[in-house]
Image: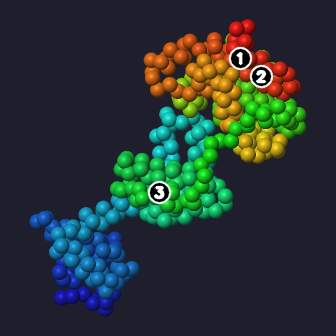
Amino acid sequence: MKLTDAKLRTLTTPGKYSDGQGLYLEITPAGGQYWRLKYRHLKKEKRLALGVYPEVTLKEVREKAATARKDIQAGIDPSAARQAEKQRKLTEAENTLQAVASDWLQHQSNKWTPDTKARIWQTLKADLFPLLGDRPLALIKPKEIMRAVQKIETRGAADQASRVLQRAKAIYRWAATHGRIETNPMLDLVPGEILKPREVTHRAALGERELPEFLQRLENYAGDPTIKNALKLLILTATRPGEVRGARWDELHLDDALWVIPAERMKMRQEHQIPLSRQALEVIEAMRPLSSDRELIFPSPTYRSKSISENTFNSAMRRMGYGTATAHGFRSTFSTITNEQDRTMGDVVERALAHKDRNKVRAAYLRSTFLADRVGLMQWWADYLDQRRIGAEVIQLKDHRAA
């Protein structure tokens, strides 16, 4: 006999009360009233929980049982399907965009310097996580990523938009490879079809004729001395902005006039030894009363335990009237001028710029033999900058080397 609402209201004795076709209400000695469906799958008897009475009414539980019977007839085990769905939701909850991005970034640790990792995380934190960070990776649609990067583009940050799109695609590719999602839905997101076409330009560098006025303005820069000295050392050593920003006192070997940047801070993951000219040593000495009690040579003027920010150099250059040039561009200026001075110095210049030679045997040879040449090169470069600043006659590089 089937159950009725009236009968259900009178049931209090522990036991099982059938509604037919395997559906029944089980009342426990503790008073709990649970809906169950008894069924067979692959010749095994199984039970499926369908809720608690009276939260789940008789009408509702019959509808649930009917749906489950259709699955059983189709060869689907409703209990296993429920467990799979529960696991899927749990997996999705654990694999949000932000959680997977964090694991992806950690996995790439050996490829990037700490500065690079921090910069990548900051871009994601600023432009992607507020919109999609807490969403399950598998439930984010390509159009949502597309809208997020287009939003960045509309504020005039086209380069940033392109980088965020590239990183989002890399996160999804890594997630699919490592089983964090079943498939990668972002494969068809092509930057050229999402972002507006733009002219690709190299990082703007100052030309040789612009150097004298710029160097004079830098010498008279009235801003924070830490920023002024950091920019000076950047130019004198032809290093990358991130390498100067993260420069530490314990990396200096002043008795040997060397700055040794460890591999983990270098783009190519290879230790870089930089000969320090007299002028570079003077810059470092000027920082001693300002930061020798700190780990960093050029700490942030605002947050002394942190390095100066990524945009600090370019902002200082804008204040000096050079808004189109970038601090990174001084590496190009150095390369152009030194190579024009002496074409035979190409390998030495490349080593000074910490460019990696793809030939491992040749790279080992260059690393072992060019340090002495680079000592002369970096001193010539510092003298050249001084001479251009004051308008004196420039000593030719080949004459400087012979001397």
Task: Report which quarter residue 259 is drawn in.
Answer: top right
- Secondary element under disc 1, as helix, strand or loop, is helix
> In the rendered view, does 95 fall on the left or right side of 123?
left
**Which of labels 3 and 1 is toward the front?**
1
- Secondary element under disc 3, as helix, strand or loop, is loop
The residue lying furthest to the bottom in this view is 6
- Secondary element under disc 2, as helix, strand or loop, is helix
Residue 21, horizontal then vertical, whole percent: 17, 81
Q: Which residue is mark 1?
A: 397
> In the rendered view, does 328 fall on the left or right side of 135?
right
Looking at this view, is 179 or 173 the one in front? 173
Q: Mark 1 belongs to which amino acid?
A: Leu
**Which badge, 2 or 3, comes first in the chain's sequence?**
3
Residue 158, horizontal then vertical, whole percent: 62, 55
Looking at this view, is 191 or 338 the one in front? 338
Residue 336 visible (yes or no): yes
Q: Which residue is mark 3?
A: 190
Q: Which residue is mark 2?
A: 384
The residue lying furthest to the left in this view is 43
